[in-house]
Amino acid sequence: MTGTAATLSKGERTRRRIVGHATQLIYDKGYGKTTIEDVIEAAGVTKGSFYFHFSSKEELGYAVIDNASSLILGSIKGVFDQQNLAPIQRLELMLRGVQGMVEEAECTRGCILGNLALEMSNVHDGFRSKLAEVFRGWSSLIAGVLEAMKLSGELPQDFDSAAYAYFMVSALEGGIIMSKVSLDPSPMRNCIDLIFRQLESKITACDRGSK
């Protein structure tokens, strides 16, 4: 047991177990097809224990979004914190990491955040709002790397980092969806390649302008 896990109370460990199993179930089956009974059985807890931590399936769903976003954005921050890599290398490592996870699942599962956005955005405004916040956070992390490239002269000063970051996330999520429905990694790979071709063209143009 890690030091962090050892310091958690029994109640917090139980809550985390419930959220962890719920995250996996919702990733596999979707929110609508996952029942509270499914989560109780998977987590090995009693109904009373479940309702001690969560008043409803909706509250659990919010916790799943928080859990998934924490894992995904935490992983991205870990990549972006690698100061031994050039900014463009960090961006590529992030995107190739996502590509690897999707391909490892043979394109059958997609992205849990994208899946929930497609399933829930039109039927639940609370879910839509929380998911929008997560995607904004992801875009903001990417924009920070792009801004560093502007400061170092790798990108033109009029380059819109925020807009391009949002484009990157949108293109990647779209590619993941297309790969999921076709069970073919090519759409996702093509999106990533095009993202980098366009970014590299900006870097090349900046290099030419500085000479």
Image: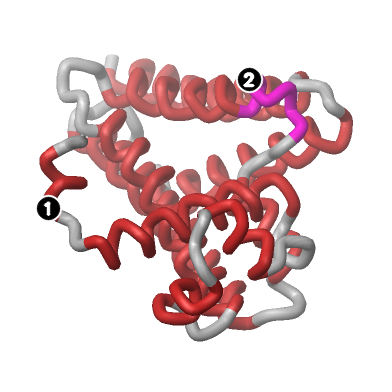
- The answer to whether 118 appears left or right of 193 in the picture is right
Name the residue beneath numbered marker 1: 7
How many other residues sit within 10 Å of disc 2, few (<14), some (14-19) or many (≥20)? few
Position of the N terminus by quadrant? top left
Front one among 122 and 71: 71
Residue 182 percent coordinates (x, y) = 88, 30
Residue occupying the point 79% across, 35% down: 180
- Viewed as shown, does residue 195 lie left or right of 117? left
x then y, percent, for residue 165: 46, 46
- Residue 103 in the magenta stretch? The answer is yes
Residue kind at label 2, given as amino acid type: Glu
Q: Which residues are magenta?
A: 102-108
* Relative vertical location of residue 37 with respect to residue 3 in this rendering, above or below: below
* Mark nearer the viewer, 2 or 1: 1
N-term mark: 2 or 1: 1
In the drawing, what numbered circle is on residue 121? none
136 vs 206: above or below: below
Image mark for residue 104: 2
Q: Is residue 115 left or right of residue 68?
A: right
Query: Which image quadrant is residue 16 in?
Result: bottom left
**Residue 201 visible in the shown view:** no
Q: Residue at x 30, y 57 (%)?
A: 13
Under mark 1, the amino acid is: Thr
Is residue 193 visible in this depiction of the protein? Answer: yes
- The residue under the point 35% across, 23% down is 88
Q: Please, is residue 103 above or below residue 79 in the view?
A: above
* Residue shown at 36% from the left, 60% from the top: 14
Choose between 12 and 33: the one closer to the eye. 12
